[in-house]
Amino acid sequence: MSSYIIQGRTRLEGEVKISGSKNASLPILAATILNSGISKLYNVPNIHDTQKMLEILELLGCKIKKKENKIIIDSSNIKKFEIPEHLMREMRSSVVLAGSLLGRYRTATFSYPGGCDIGARPIDLHLKSFEKLGINISENYGKIECKCDKIIGTKINLDFPSVGATENTMLSACLAEGITTISNAAREPEIIDLQNFLNKMGAKIKGAGTNIIEITGVKKLKDVDYNIMPDRIEAGTFLVAGAATGGNIQIYDISANCIEPIINKLEEANCKINIGKNTIELQAPKKLKAVDIKTMPYPGFPTDMQSIFTTAMTIAKGTSVIIENIFENRYKYTQELVRMGAKITIEGKAAIVKGVKRLQGTTVKATDLRGGAAMVVAGMIAQGITEVEEIQYILRGYEKFDKKLAKLGAKIYLKQ
């Protein structure tokens, strides 16, 4: 297994370009099934999860060409309607393919998805939405079979603003008869990006970014060219890494609007932030001030940034209280930080983090995607050498992570 070797106590300085969004790319890649033609996508990050999504699309019958920063997908000749179980287990986001297959073909078969073990992420809200749209669902030997003669628009109220359930409902209702309204919809920027992509294909959707989304079914969609939005979690990761290392960095190709909660907390920790049109510059203080965070659905503080921000707080002045409201297993990484000398106590949903003078390098493992990124940040602020094992989790969501950090001055290299 590959690992990262990191020489600690290095200050990040310079500028870095933010890649396309993982969480926007995956549903948009799935949505290319709907137009029965050609989709040209730009700014899709070259990461494990997008590679797996493209692999599934090819297995279903799509023809895919890659040219520099462009991916061309021809979905005119899909022959299969079952998402392979082994690929579903590797990548949870593959479940959104079900909505696209149902939207176009009125049939889809899939198994329960896998991915990072950060807590229960049931797909019951997806299935309830499908049933409301008139889709018949049966389960046989772990496989979920969804079929219907037609999809009829209806009113759907989500019990929780689930991103995946919102996306799957949008995808399945694009070509439905009548109007579908999603209440308590997820409001993430990636939902807006999906709406923009679908509308460019000829769909009629409005309300993304609010808690009510309205989809008016159309009969046919068309070919499309589309540029994926930048990755706000990658942007937040680099800003927090800069803050933790006492650095001065600038990230570009990103809007500050979508990471406002992260910027607010960094400013509260005494970082200086300068915001340009598509750039954000961070100047870190000599010592970060401890701050409290509470993860919430968007526009609250993102759960995907919790582990990375907590890592920065391990060397801050004072005590931080972190509340994780989204996933119950998201504190696994804290055991690795404690091995490096962090003082963290877990009490239910809360992590109490008492700042220490420094962390000590050692061998740690990535427990999940964002927990893995947190370990890399920990390695950069620790004394001595840190080896981060099981980096396959990190490769799921960060493009050229080690190379981008090295460009900023980090002493990091890949050990095969």
Image (tube, grey):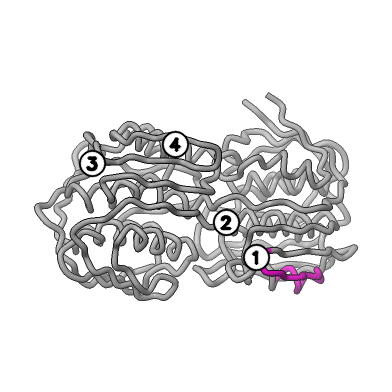
Mark 4 lies on a secondary structure that is: helix
Residue 253: which quarter of the image?
A: bottom right
Q: Which mark is residue 230?
A: 2
Question: Can you say whether 151 is above or below 399 in the image?
Answer: below
Of 387 and 4, nearer the camera is 4
Of 368 and 282, nearer the camera is 282
Mark 2 lies on a secondary structure that is: loop
Q: Earlier in the sequence, mark 3 or mark 2?
A: 3
Report how far apart the C-alphas of labels 2 and 4 lie in the structure.
Answer: 20 Å
Residue 415 coordinates in the image, percent (x, y):
72, 27
**Which residues fall within the magenta stretch?**
265-278
Quadrant where the N terminus is found in the figure: top right
Residue 61: which quarter of the image?
A: top left
Q: Earlier in the sequence, mark 1 or mark 2?
A: 2
Report how far apart the C-alphas of labels 3 and 4 lie in the structure.
Answer: 18 Å
Residue highlighted by disc 1: 322
